[in-house]
Amino acid sequence: MKEKTISGQNPSQTQPASRDIQSKAPNSSTAVARRSFIKGLGVVGATLLPGAELLKAQSSSSGKLSKGDADLLRFALWAELVESDLWTQYNELGGATAPNDGPANPGNPPYIAALQNLDGDMPQYITDNNDDELSHAAFLDAYLRAHGAESVNLDPFRILQGSTATGVDKTKIGKRLTNLLSLNVNLNWYTTYRSGQNPDLGAIINGPFTISNQPAIPLNDNDTPPTVVVPTPPIPAGSPAQRIQAIANTAGFHFAFIEQGGTSLYPTLALKATSEEVLRILLSIGGVEIDHFSLWHDKAGNAVAQPLAGVTDPETKLTFPDLNDPATLARLHLELELTQTNKIQPEPCAFLETHGLPACSIIRPTSTQLGGAVATVKSFAADGLFQGLPDGFFQLSMQLATAADNVKRR
């Protein structure tokens, strides 16, 4: 399998250029992980089969659920497990309480202060989002098991180091599933939802600026030394607080990126469901993902509006531009219509391929032709979320995604 270095990644850390599950047979280093994960695929002896045969071997129905409905829920569970891991990390450092209304969370005070420059209620929002994702994962796991279907276990892949900054759960260091220390946050959603165009109909819309190789949580206590006191914005140029504010700003955009992924994913899964109850589950959980996206879309805009706009990370040199300033927009060749920070509702756009229909405000993309589940895995991988995980994780994730995308509604 050809490999390439991810943008902003240490050249010694590589990821496959393609995550095609049939492009590489499992090797001995991933065998244990595959066996541990196999209960998420519902196949006996599947470690001996190549990808195509493995999917074929799953053709039998899983208990009271059709195979297709079980495949849809398994991938939804995969996504919720991934989200639960990253939101748990955000909550440890920036949340208001421990999960499920636990005790007050001391977190990381400079990081919390920087997040509160985006919105004073950010810690509570983070905790609530974390609780939601944990509940989604627990429910989907229990539902699959209750209906005699195989579930998904990603625990063998919880091997990433994560942050060591004050506030993290020390028992989880080295046991993370997702990487938040070096991200490439795709901002296409920001301009897409302000435009009258639709990716489902072939529109290619670029984000307003680029976030690459940027942490969304403090790496360690060097990012939050005792001398750092995050002031109320504007943050003075050259201030030590610029670093932690840039990290918090990145988190603000990353929150929205993750949740807009769920906003698009759940409709594509729901369109394939056969059981009315499974349809209800996907639409009901998907509705909460849409609620999350709307919230974080609003908060992200505060990072690129006055008085916070202009923050520059002194280490990565990333600057958060003022997306309401005519001079900045002219320099970046942008239009205010596509960047205005207080526009967060989806603009009406072309919908369906039937000619003559008026524009309609919708979630996008939702076309099943784009492969919602596979697209989700690839998007999260490009984000850098899985940097450092073994190939076996990608092979198995793509296997679940392919199974979900191949479901045909009966």
Image: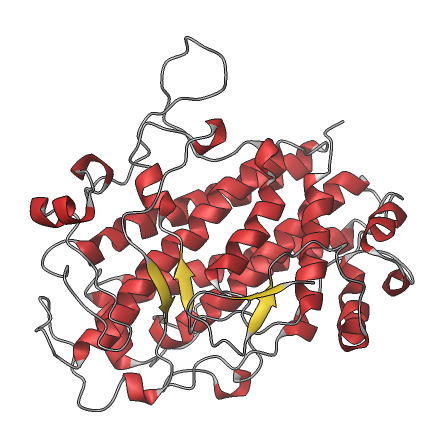
Q: Position of residue 342 (x, y in %)?
A: 19, 43
Q: Where is residue 82 shown, x and y percent of the image? A: 56, 62
In the displayed structure, would residue 185 be above or below residue 290?
below
Q: Say if residue 100 shows up in the picture.
A: no
**Residue 211 or 46: which is nearer the viewer?**
211
For the C terminus, the image quarter is top right
In this view, 49 is above or below 369: below
Question: Farthest top residue?
Answer: 356
Q: Quadrant of the N terminus?
A: bottom right
Nearer to the camera, 217 or 339: 339
Q: Quadrant of residue 38?
A: bottom right
Q: How many marks can you see?
A: 0
- Give the x, y percent position of residue 388: 57, 74
Residue 139: x, y in percent? 63, 55
The answer to whether residue 84 is visible is yes
Q: Which residue sits furthest bottom?
A: 226
Q: Is residue 204 above or below residue 359?
A: below
Q: Is residue 67 left or right of residue 354?
A: right
Left or right? Give the position of 359 relative to 269: left
Name the residue located 56 percent from the left edge and 53 percent from the top edge: 378
| Residue at the image point whose x is 80% and y is 67% from the top | 26
Picture layout, residue 158 above or below residue 373: below
Foreground residue, 305 or 119? Answer: 305
Task: Give left or right: position of 235 versus 176.
Answer: left
Q: Measuring 23% from the left and 72% from the top, which residue is drawn there?
A: 313
> Which quadrant of the structure image shows residue 16?
bottom right
Residue depicted at x 71% and y 60%: 395
